[in-house]
Structures are given as C-alpha cells and as structure tokens.
Amino acid sequence: MDTLVSQEEAVQTLLQNYASEANSDEAVETQLSFDRDRGHYQLVYVGWEGDRRVYGCVLHFDIKDGKIWIQHNGTEVDVAAELVRLGIPKTEIVIGFHSPFKRQFTDYAVG
C-alpha cells in the first residue's frame, strides 16, 4: 500500500475512533476536519456548556514530507503509540509540538 494512503488512513481512523468515544453532549459538537489536498486533519469541539462557549482543537495532525506530524494533542492518549499500533513506523512520525531540539531524544522522527 502507498505510504501516503496508509498514513492518511491511520490518521483518519485514529481521529474517527476518538470522535466516536467523545462525550455525546448535544450542546457540544465533535467535528472532524480532513483537508486531504493539503494534509491537515483535526478533531475540534464546538458548542456551549450553559453560558460558557466551548471551542477548541483536541487533535491536529499534518502529513508532510512523507511524515505524520502530531501538531497538537489535547488528550491523555499517546497518539504516537496509537499510530504505531495502526502500522505507522516511528520513523514516519514527528512529535511536532516538541521543539526540534527535544525531538532527538524521542524514539520518533525529528522532522
């Protein structure tokens, strides 16, 4: 299978699984945003909890230069390990929210 296709499928599967397990509160919507042409994938919460506005990106991935970049992880889940479980090699995963200096000390790609 083509690397890009397998990376896209893994990211989309991970986001869809997480969205299906998210709180089913009707006032707060769980939105998936996939921009396949530009390689951007996000899960966002949008809505209201009483008088309080809820809006925020929970997970954000980019696919660029042959690697999956984890740009934001607002969960307690180790999404990099989840990607590995879905068949993505560690050499194709960048922890983008870590500084370039810090990435060299992980088991994942540096960029």
Image (cartoon, helix red, strand yellow):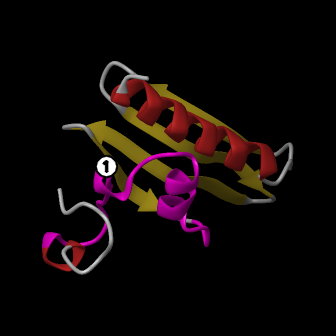
Residue 78: quarter of image: bottom right
Residue that appears at 25% across and 60% down: 109
Query: Magenta span has 52?
Result: no
Residue that appears at 62% across and 37% down: 13
Residue 101: quarter of image: bottom left
Q: Pick the quarter of the image with the C terminus.
A: bottom left
Q: Position of residue 103 (x, y in %)?
A: 23, 72
Residue that appears at 86% across and 48% down: 24
Q: Residue furthest top?
A: 37
Query: Magenta span has 97?
Result: yes
Q: Taking 60 as reference, is 37 left or right?
A: left
Q: Taking 6 as reference, is 108 left or right?
A: left
Residue tagged by mark 1?
Answer: 92
Secondary structure beneath dot 1 equals helix
Numbered range of the magenta stretch: 75-100
Q: Pick the quarter of the image with the N terminus.
A: top left
**For residue 30, above or below residue 85:** above
Q: Kindly tell me whether residue 58 is visible in this rendering.
A: no
Viewer-proximal residue among 12 and 59: 12
Q: Kindly tell me whether residue 19 is visible in this rendering.
A: yes
Q: Position of residue 9 (x, y in %)?
A: 53, 30
Q: Taking 23 as reference, is 19 left or right?
A: left
Q: Residues within 10 Å of mark 1 (few under 14, many from 20)?
A: many
- Three-letter amino acid code at the position of disc 1: Glu
**For residue 44, above or below residue 100:** above
Q: Position of residue 69 (x, y in %)?
A: 32, 50
Q: Position of residue 92 (x, y in %)?
A: 31, 49
Viewer-proximal residue among 56 and 41: 41
